[in-house]
Image (cartoon, grey):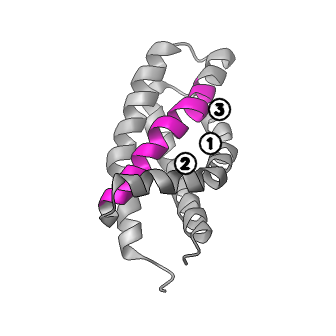
Amino acid sequence: DAPWDARRCATFMMWSTGVAFALDRYVYSHLFARWWPRNCFRNVLKATAADNIVITPFLYFPCFYAWEAVCEGNEMRTAAERYRAEAVVQLPMTWAFWVPANLVTFSIAPHLRTVWSGAAGTLYIGLLSYVAHAYRGES
């Protein structure tokens, strides 16, 4: 196996620049700004909890696994099975990264959240890709 997989990289790139950007922009800049309009510490904690307990495990990851299955030509059942198997590894890693990052995300003005999340997400996607493929025994 080559250490760099162009198809895997393209899948993550398309996800990050297309789907994830749209989800982040809508959820972080619109919904969360409407639900918790003031940048007080209590609202930052509520938004961080909502993102990590609800949005990520029940919206973001299922959408990502479905995206990956489509890009790889697999069935949605395969995506669901893969997510169930990998969630025990990926969710704790996600929370370790995104809880602190979300404390920053939801402390800044709503119009800057997507930009910040995109920058942090670039690093996170690389880590997630590495962990996911190491878990599967791939390079």
Camera-nearest residue between 90 and 111: 90
Residue at x 62% of width, y 42% of height: 98
**Residue 58 appears in the figure:** yes
**Marks 1,2: beta carbons within 8 A:** yes
Residue type, mark 2 in image: Ala
Q: Secondary structure at mark 3?
A: helix
Q: CA distance from mark 1 to mark 2?
A: 9 Å
Decide: few, some or many residues near mark 2? Use Cα within 10 Å; few <14, some 14-19, many ≥20: some
Find residue 62 and report its image quarter: top left
Q: Is residue 49 magenta?
A: yes
Camera-nearest residue between 109 and 77: 77
What residue does disc 2 label? 120
Q: Secondary structure at mark 2?
A: helix
Residue type, mark 3 in image: Leu
Residue type, mark 1 in image: Trp
Q: Which residues are magenta?
A: 47-70
N-terminal of the pair, mark 2 or mark 3, is 3
Instruction: Answer above or below: position of 96 versus 110.
Output: below
- Classify residue 70 as left or right of residue 47: left
Instruction: Answer above or below: position of 120 versus 22.
Output: below
Q: CA distance from mark 2 to mark 3?
A: 12 Å
**Marks 1,3: beta carbons within 8 A:** no
Q: Which mark is residue 98?
A: 1
N-terminal of the pair, mark 1 or mark 2, is 1
What residue does disc 3 label? 103
Q: Is residue 133 magenta?
A: no
